[in-house]
Amino acid sequence: MHVLARLPDAPFSPRVIYWLLATMLRIEVGGVIVVEIVVEVSNLSVSYNGNRVIHNVSFPAASRQLIGVIGPNGAGKTTLIKAMVGLLNIDEGAVVMFNQPVKRVRRKIAYVPQRSTIDFHFPVRVEDVVLMGRYPHLPWWRFPRARDYRVVEQALQEVELLDLRQRQIGQLSGGQQQRVFLARALAQQADLLFLDEPFAGIDIQSEEMIMQLLKNLRDRGKTIFVVNHDLNKAGSYFDNLLLLRNSLIAWGKAEEVLQPGILKQAYCEKAAFLETFNELVVVSA
Ligand SMILES: Nc1ncnc2c1ncn2[C@@H]1O[C@H](COP(=O)(O)OP(=O)(O)OP(=O)(O)O)[C@@H](O)[C@H]1O
Ligand SMILES: [Mg+2]
């Protein structure tokens, strides 16, 4: 065999070069924050008992984004996020998070289900719920340590519930319960959060506080998906919107998606829109 040319020995192996490039994409380069794609959903389809509910949905999501998932009742919003976090089997397609299949990165993902699906009669205290966020970090043989309890305390402080830490979860208001689940996600130190209808049935003060917390988390580099019903707040709450009606009607910056022509494709006759002074007001949906 003739060796035509020999490449000089590389100072780094391809694996190291790949790692360096990947790291550079995650940090600030020259003061500019380089956006990293953290979620890639491709051609996702999901069914219940043979009835297809999610059809061929594809979108990428970048880091540092607050993403609203909107669409009419039964559009498949809950189904989509449950399939994304690996709680439902998928028929076709793929979900990749941090360049890995979901089951490899579960520790980085926090999911807060729709409150109506949680049994609040279960006798568990606020701090026990938040401590559950630490379990993905613990090997099976280890009990939580002082550091874990410190993280729990910090999380409860952040959602302003430290004084209610001993209270049974069922004895809290809806807004406080939602904040407990947010504290669990904080204690987990997850990078990707999925919240299903966190504002349903809670008071406006709790809603504003949770929204401020979510914006702070986004500014700290997290990506957050929030299923939300209120179209009138979608523009001020979210950076991007994912509009669903079994298939993906629209995906993009909030102001691009919140156009009457696009919304009508999803809500049809269920929504009425008023366009006044260049502002879109959803009268009913
Ligand atoms: N476990 C299930 N078994 C069978 N069908 C289901 C199941 N869960 C949901 N569905 C159906 O799938 C469709 C999508 O439901 P999904 O809960 O994802 O909608 P959604 O957009 O979250 O609605 P909502 O706004 O009411 O929460 C609906 O037609 C619903 O009836
Ligand atoms: Mg739902």
Image (tube, rainbow, N blue to C red):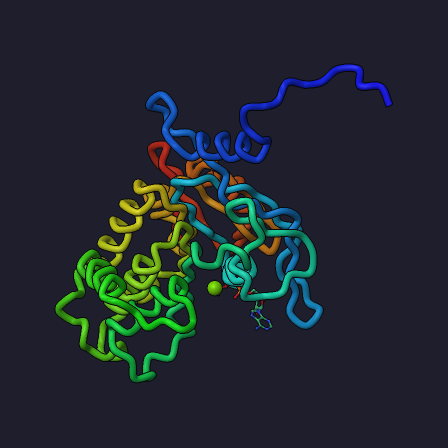
Camera sees residue 208: yes
Q: Nearer the viewer, residue 122 or 143?
A: 143
The one nearer the camera, 67 or 100, is: 100
Q: Position of residue 23 (x, y in %)?
A: 45, 34
Question: What percent of the width, then of the height, locates residue 267?
Answer: 52, 52
Q: Residue at x 59, y 51 (%)?
A: 95
Taking the view exactly as shown, the residue that stands out farthest to the left is: 163
Considering every residue shown, the one lying at the far top of the view is 5
Q: Quadrant of ligand 1?
A: bottom right
Q: Is residue 232 left or right of residue 168?
A: right
Judged left or right of residue 97, residue 94 is right
Q: Residue at point 52% right, 49% down?
A: 97
Residue at point 55%, 33% (across, down): 18
Q: Quarter of the image for the N terminus: give it.
A: top right
Residue 187 against residue 60 in the figure, above or below: below
Residue 70 in the image, given as x and y percentages of width and height: 47, 52
Q: Quadrant of the C terminus?
A: bottom left
Residue with the most extreme right position: 1
Is there any visible trace of residue 203 in the rendered image?
no
Which residue is at a point 27% across and 67% down the rendered structure image?
145
Q: Nearer the viewer, residue 99 or 82?
A: 99
In the rendered image, residue 183, in percent from the top left (x then y), is placed at: 28, 61
